[in-house]
Image (spheres, grey):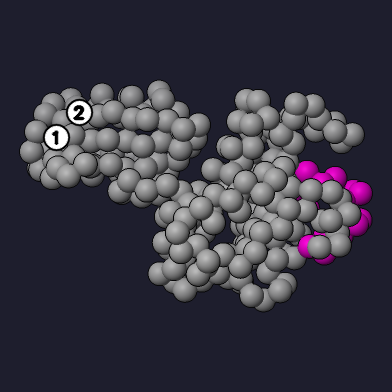
């Protein structure tokens, strides 16, 4: 939308209540501004419309103060578009190892035109044998910690980085349901690893929803973590 008094900001992982509270508080001091938002699970598009450019800018600054850690774009773009753009700017490459997300993460990245410049490979290592053979995950780790674990997610990412081709590695392992496996871990439990030469960080989540929703939330979260991480490479 071409309008100097209209701004879009993309935020991740913020529930409706804190968003609505922030809108209300900002409007008290800036009544000439209006807010609206559209949600796609954990991904949120916030629109800020002011009576004039000043009111819109003030509202944007106040919104940014509250959600600085959750904002991934100050324009209308998807998570994958932002990730590919940042990778291109840094002339970096990314590799992905997926278990419970089943190739959906790789598909989201390669859906962006020009992704071939930055996407090196996507590996769907769904079984324990594939994790060990293709990614070098230690069989003792699989037996001791189980495939859905921080240890295994980290080793999956390390296996990608060991090829010394990609600058960024993303790995996902989890239980999308509808039932748990022999581990007895709860449905929705997942671990997402993001790593580079600077090190690997593993994040633990418990997503709610059905199988499709849990998978989508895992993909969205992995993309968001990658965006945050790649800025530090």
Residue 195: image tag: none
Image height of 178 relative to 204, above or below: above
Image height of 128 relative to 58, above or below: below
Which percent across, then down, holds residue 15?
A: 45, 28
Q: Earlier in the sequence, mark 1 or mark 2?
A: 2
Asked whether, in this view, residue 135 is left or right of residue 63, the answer is right
Query: Could you say which quadrant of the image residue 193 lies in?
Result: bottom right
Asked whether, in this view, residue 3 is left or right of residue 184, the answer is left
Q: Residue at x 46, y 64 (%)?
A: 114
Which percent across, then down, holds residue 143?
A: 91, 49
Q: Residue at x 33, y 30 (%)?
A: 37
- Which of the two residues, 136 or 31, is positioned nearer the viewer here? 136
Q: Secondary structure at mark 2?
A: strand
Q: Residue 30 in magenta?
A: no
- The residue beneath circle 2 is 34
Asked whether, in this view, residue 210 is left or right of residue 118, the answer is right
Query: Could you say which quadrant of the image residue 48 lies in?
Result: top left
Asked whether, in this view, residue 56 is left or right of residue 93, the answer is left
- The residue beneath circle 1 is 50
Q: Residue 142 in magenta?
A: yes
Per the model, the C-alpha gap separating discs 1 and 2 is 6 Å
Q: Tell me the chief SS of the magenta region.
A: helix
Residue 191 shows in this picture:
no
Image marks 1 and 2: residues in contact by CB distance under 8 Å: yes
Q: Secondary structure at mark 1?
A: strand
- Which of the two residues, 233 or 38, is positioned nearer the viewer here? 38
Local packing at callout 2 (Cα closer than 10 Å; few below 14, some 14-19, many 20+) is some
The stretch of residues the image draws in magenta is 135-153
């Amino acid at each position: 939308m071409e309008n100097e008094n209209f701004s879009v900001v993309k935020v991740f992982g913020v529930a409706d209540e804190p968003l609505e509270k922030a809108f209300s508080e900002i409007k008290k001091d800036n009544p000439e501004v209006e807010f609206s938002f559209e949600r796609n699970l954990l991904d949120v598009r916030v629109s800020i419309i002011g009576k004039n450019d000043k009111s819109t800018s003030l509202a944007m600054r106040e919104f940014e103060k509250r959600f600085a850690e959750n904002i991934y774009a100050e324009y209308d773009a998807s998570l994958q578009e932002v990730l590919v753009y940042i990778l291109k700017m840094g002339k970096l490459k990314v590799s992905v190892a997926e278990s419970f997300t089943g190739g959906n993460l790789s598909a989201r990245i390669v859906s962006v035109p020009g992704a071939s410049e930055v996407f090196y490979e996507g590996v769907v290592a769904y079984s324990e044998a594939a994790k060990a053979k293709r990614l070098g995950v230690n069989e003792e780790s699989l037996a001791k910690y189980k495939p859905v674990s921080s240890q295994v997610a980290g080793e999956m990412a390390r296996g990608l980085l060991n090829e010394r081709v990609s600058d960024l590695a993303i790995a996902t392992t989890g239980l999308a349901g509808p039932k748990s496996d022999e581990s007895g871990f709860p449905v929705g439990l997942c671990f997402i690893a993001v790593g580079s030469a600077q090190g690997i960080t593993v994040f633990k989540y418990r997503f709610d929803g059905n199988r499709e929703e849990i998978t989508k939330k895992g993909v969205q979260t992995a993309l968001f973590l990658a965006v945050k991480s790649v800025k530090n490479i």
